[in-house]
Amino acid sequence: MNTPLIEFRNVTKRFGTKTVLENVNLQIYEGQITTIIGLSGSGKSVMLKHIIGLIQPDEGTIFFQGKPITEMKKSEINEAFGQISYMFQGNALLDSLTVYDNIALPLRETTNLKKTEIDRRVMARVEQTELTEAIHKYPAELSGGMQKRAALARALITDPQIVLFDEPTTGQDPVRKNAILSMIAQYQRKFNFTAVLVSHEIPDVYFISNRILALYDRQIVFQGTPEELENFEHPFMDEVISSLEALQKELTGLFSKRQFVMLNHLQLKRRKVGESYCVVVFSLNELTAIYTKVGHDAAQEALRNMGLYIDKHFGDIGGFSTRRSSNEIITMLPYSNLAETESIIDDFVSDFQRQVLPAIGTGACKMAAGESVEFNIVAGIAEGQSTTDLDSVIALAKSQQKEIGRFNCAAGE
Amino acid sequence: MAAFENNMTESTNGQQVLPVLRPFTFVGRTIMDWINSMGAATIFLCLALLRTLGRKQLFKTVQQTYFIGARSITIIMLVSLFTGMVLGLQSYHALLKFGAAGAVGSLVSLSLIMELGPVLTAIMITARAGSAITAEIGVQRISEQIDALSTMRINPIRYLISPKISASIISFPLLTAVFDLVGILGGYVSAVVLLGLNGGVYLHSIKTYVEMSDIINGFTKSIVFAVIVATVCCYQGYFAHMRRDSHGAQAVGLATTSAVVTSCVLILVSDYVVTSLMV
């Protein structure tokens, strides 16, 4: 792999007699979304503040593009840190400035751009973060979600190469949490910055992250992909991940991928050889286009409602579901063969089209301002057996997806 | 040996001290803290002064001058009017006993220009603007707004502190001048209008006894007070998060109290020092 953009080698930090980080080693790579997970108070924010130089390590070295920061000249440090933006947990918007002035502040103070150019750039960010109506308001007059968006707009105004997000979803409801995460993922793809997140939102954060770092007992105990984390055997998984997953199940009704796989194993153990099960893969197509037209909040609300309905419908007949990616939900029907599942899906589609789809569409369409937005939901079924690899069954179901519902905002149908 | 160790108590920095030495330890630590704070505040002031100039600083300095200076005029005029009136009243009756009532004007004006004007102006601004500066910066500190400035590569001392110190250096002498003038007018009202002293005598005595050096000395004091008040108030707010006696909002409250008390004490101490150097 390439030289890490940021690397910690044996970093230790103490506050008085309390050791917060001890011999921490980690790597953050360019162009990726890296998420740091861990219990509250475990030192995740402290780690993030080391990256931007707000806190210095007591021991160990931090490398930026392979070079130790301690050996860099002041101009090099300024240049390196100038590429980094930081979005604070509490937003840290200057409360005596309006939203517009907060977003414009870095450009006004650190560049010699003309007023018209600053205005153009600020208004572009304001529109992207859906803050047009709030530009003359002060932070205290905004909702929590709007403050987050204002902080995000300010963090992105200088087109940074690296953006650090310190618990960007704290204090938000489940829909808005996902909206913020999807916004971060969308902007990361659009502006191609390196993102480092501190977050508790499991499993939602897995869908947007390339790498996960697990901080446990003052050390980084895991570095790898979300998929690798699923197979990680460590007390961290029992103490941290399980509790966060239980909370997530309570909030959304859907199981985490790890829980889903475990449930699946349990179910398959009880089956005799030759008995089959079915997997259904539901997808909401063109999610990015929907984000653009109705906003992240409305799109996430639609996805959440879809998930809740799927969970309720199939949960009643022994099925269980998980979100596999930002726009995909997988349902396992352990006691149904293909013919039974097709019949169940027919009933589901009929109810879904009659009751759920109009409700999802109408809610989201309020945000579309008369624009043509199409919600196209597809589903695919595949049959597997206890000896079949689950991933291949899911892939087969995905390849057989066909439309089960469509709603157009402009047409209202 | 064990008995000796049992008598030892642990000081806050973890060292073992005998109970009998604890008062000395406390005094020593307090003095060391004071010296540390003075050194840190001096460095803080130097860093702020080095960052006062610049095109982008001008607007912020004007804004702060309006807040510290223009918005303090009313309270300064009110205080100075009554200070001058009291001075005129007291000095008229005192000097009358010696047949020197004609010197009321010079007594009032010299008292105001050399002493009361700079001191009372500084104390009034500390109470009105200094406390607000500490509270504002303290809140910005505990809500991570100052850290946010650092992460945006905006120097917080340049952005927040330098304009306030520049504005104080501009505002204090101007407000002192206002205080002196209105105070002299107050003395005129009580001595001439209310007590019947000849107006020409009052003004002539001022013209005769007040010299340019007196006025310069008064303004020099006001500039010294400006630097002290602005530095103490900004410093207390800026480092509110490092207080050992409290945290959060309580730290901001205590920092504000400390700023006002320390400023007032330092105004009077430095007043003596500056006066002794000028006499």
Image: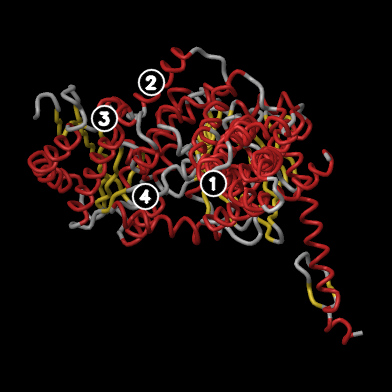
Foreground mark, 1 or 3, reads: 1
Tell me residue A204's x, y (percent).
Answer: 39, 44
Foreground mark, 2 or 1, reads: 1
Q: Is residue B24 left or right of residue A139?
A: right
Question: Do discs 2 and 1 share a chain?
Answer: no
Separation of marks 1 and 3 at Cα, in angstroms: 92 Å
Label number found at residue A285: 3
Separation of marks 3 and 2 at Cα, in angstroms: 30 Å
Q: In which quarter of the image is the N terminus of chain A?
A: top right
Residue reaching furthest front? B99
Check the residue under mark 1 and report the chain it is in.
Answer: B
The answer to which quarter of the image holds residue A317 is bottom left
Find disc 2 in the rendering and name its residue.
A123
Tell me residue B84's x, y (percent).
Answer: 58, 44
Question: Do discs 3 and 2 share a chain?
Answer: yes
Number of other residues with Cα within 10 Å of mark 1, as a class: few under 14, some 14 to 19, many 20 or more: some
Question: Do discs 4 and 1 share a chain?
Answer: no
Foreground mark, 4 or 1, reads: 1
Foreground mark, 3 or 2, reads: 2
Residue type, mark 1 in image: Leu
Q: In this view, does A162 lie above or below B17?
A: above
Label number found at residue B195: 1
Which residue does the image show at 20% across and 35% down from the upper left?
A364
Question: Do discs 1 and 3 share a chain?
Answer: no
The answer to which quarter of the image holds residue A345 is top left
Residue type, mark 4 in image: Thr
